[in-house]
Image: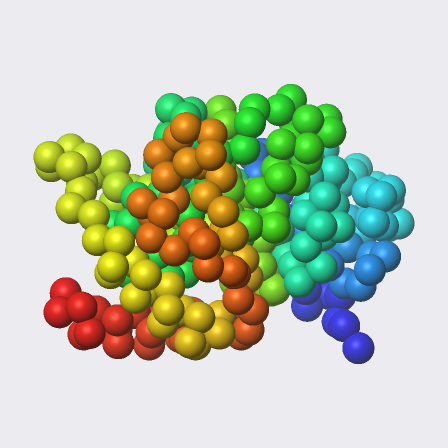
Amino acid sequence: MVNEYEIKKEICDIGKRIYNRGMVASNDGNISVKLNDHEFLCTPTGVSKGFMTPEFICKVNENGEVLQANKGFKPSSEIKMHMRVYKERPDVNSVVHAHPMYATSFAIAGIPLTQPIMPEAVIALGCVPIAEYGTPSTEEIPDAVSKYLQYFDAVLLANHGALAYSDTLLNAYHKMESVEFYAQLLFLSKQLGGPKELSKEQVERLYEIRRKFGMKGKHPANICLNAKEGKPSCHSCGGCASKAESAASDSDLVAAITKKVMQELGI
């Protein structure tokens, strides 16, 4: 049986992590966890994610309606975005929304994270597109995010921030952390004359290794949505024709795969 109190404590712990890492400021960001098809825990609105305790956490149903909330707390105004993810991605059990500095800067500049610059990012994230701008707390953001949900496990929100989702809260947080690290490396490498991208062949080898290890999630898209829209293509279209595969993944598996890949590529 799910121990809701322990999950609430974990939400608070992840909230502290994203706050302490500067991924949110003030009361920004929100986190949710799926208990079952009809019950979800989520962070409240108007509260710093770095200073939450379990009694802050609210419970809502699949429509975002309050099932339980202590006096003075109400669910995040972005709960509609979370519910859309759960509705369209049954494999997802947790959603993390934050405003990490570098990733959000790319979102504001309108630049998707698609350049293949390191094995870890290619394997763990694939590509991170940008969902069109939407007014917070409205259906505009869920609608904008919706078309990317079947193809990607993280997405930038134009002029807003980033969204990551996975089978566990820890994995969703790790994806957010990876998005920010990828964005920071890409930004810094551009200051040093531009990144030296992995070749199409190297990217396809990474995709094949990922498929071989059967990692969970959607990766990469069946078709390159960026290229279709005239934007920079997903990883130079090195494997966009490949279907996303499903199976288990965690941070230790990613690290082991990455070590093997770097040895094979001589990096």
Indicate left or right for 27 with 25 as reference.
right
Q: Is residue 85 left or right of residue 194?
A: right
Would residue 34 appear left or right of 71 to someone viewing this image?
Answer: left
The quarter in which the C terminus is drawn is bottom left
From the top left corner, tell me how far across and down residue 24 is, in percent.
48, 38
Asked whether 60 or 263 is in front, the reply is 263
Q: Is residue 26 visible?
A: no
Kindly indicate the quadrant of the structure image that contains residue 122: bottom left
The vertical placement of 249 against 202, above or below, is below
> In the rendered image, is residue 5 in sight?
yes
Residue at 15%, 46% (x, y): give it: 196
Instruction: Measuring from the top left, give residue 114's x and y in whole percent.
Output: 36, 43
Residue under the point 58% across and 59% down: 166
- Please identify the quadrant where the N terminus is shown: bottom right
Residue 127 higher or lower than 140, as above or below: below
The residue drawn where x is 32% and y is 61% is 204
